[in-house]
Image (cartoon, grey):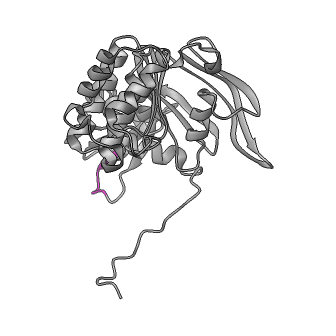
Amino acid sequence: MIRAYELTKRYGNTTVVHGLDFTVRPGTVTGFLGPNGAGKSTTMRMLLGLDAPTRGRSTVGGRAYATHSAPLTEVGALLEARSVHPGRTAFHHLMALAHTHGIPRSRVEHVLDLAGLTAVAGKRVKGFSLGMGQRLGIAAALLGDPATLILDEPVNGLDPEGVLWIRNLLRSLAVQGRTVLVSSHLMSEMALTADHLVIIGRGRLLADTTVADFVATAGGASVKVRTPQAPALRELLRGPGIEVTAATGSEPGELDVRGTDAAHIGRIAAAHAIPLYELTPRTASLEQAFMDLTQESVDYRVTAPEPTGALA
């Protein structure tokens, strides 16, 4: 288990992490999300004792990371996959790490095979592609067979086969009861991989919830309704927490209903003999839910180009 207690980090007059308090539990893949500059990497570095918090503290497995006598066997971490001596082979890089903890050669060979690097184990790291470097970083994180994994952008540079591999790997590790904290900017991948989300913006906690609950609430799940008696149904559906509007750019008689489900709408319509031409649940994507939540926390905004044809 990973626990953050009021984690705060200041650099001079700038506070980049503001009192973060969250728990990452075993048996789940927890996605750690936020816009660029949100403080994700700084938070991960504090969890691993690489940056000292200005205030607050964190524990991994019930203890501060620095107090673990054999950290590779407790916590596997990937923060910067290219932090490897370029002249070393993949095998010798992992063996050097293994020697610090008395980890046998057989385990090195196992994680090389697990990461799909056996065929290139004797090649120097300086010749590795970005994706191969990521695989080596993940192999290093798994070397000590740790109960906790902290991975920063592990799918960066991976091809589709590699993305599928890391997705299945993370989920299998969680099924084994391990604690998995993973950051990513790929919302579509997090939707397929993560069970729980911790979302920050400008260093502040914005959400700590399950993926399903986050999409349903922050993402604005809705139901599309088409009926010839739209005004009457609209009045019947009004109530606490329920919002009924005409769908943007819709045809007459089309409603967008939020705050309730299709079954409830169908029952209300049937009870009042209101015909329905369409009753379609629409679930917002994790990407849209994330964009809606963090729109005020984005430091670097872009303006969509106008469709003016050829570039000047």
Expressed as whole percent of the image width and height from the top left, the position of residue 129 reads 30, 49
For the question of whether residue 39 can be seen, the reply is yes
Q: Is residue 2 left or right of residue 305?
A: right
Q: Nearer the viewer, residue 218 or 253?
A: 218
**Which residue appears farthest toward the bottom when viewing the image?**
312
Expressed as whole percent of the image width and height from the top left, the position of residue 181 reads 47, 27
Q: Measuring 22% from the left and 43% from the top, which residue is drawn there?
A: 160
For the question of whether residue 195 can be seen, the reply is no
Q: Is residue 255 left or right of residue 297?
A: left
Q: Is residue 181 magenta?
A: no
Task: Relative to 175, say whether 37 is above or below.
Answer: below
Asked where in the image residue 132 lies, by quadrant, the reply is: top left
Expressed as whole percent of the image width and height from the top left, the position of residue 234 reads 39, 41
Q: Measuring 76% from the left and 34% from the top, which residue is drawn there?
A: 54
Q: Is residue 212 left or right of residue 53?
A: left
Q: Is residue 251 magenta?
A: yes
Expressed as whole percent of the image width and height from the top left, the position of residue 252 reads 29, 56
Q: How many marks?
A: 0
Q: Is residue 31 left or right of residue 273?
A: right
Split into 4 quadrants, where in the image is the C terminus? bottom left
Q: Nearer the viewer, residue 239 or 26?
A: 26
Q: Nearer the viewer, residue 48 or 13?
A: 48
Q: Nearer the viewer, residue 24 or 226?
A: 24
Task: Relative to 192, say whether 145 is above or below.
Answer: above
Task: Relative to 183, say whether 24 is above or below.
Answer: above
Q: Which residues are magenta?
A: 250-256
Q: Measuring 70% from the left and 23% from the top, which residue is drawn there?
A: 57
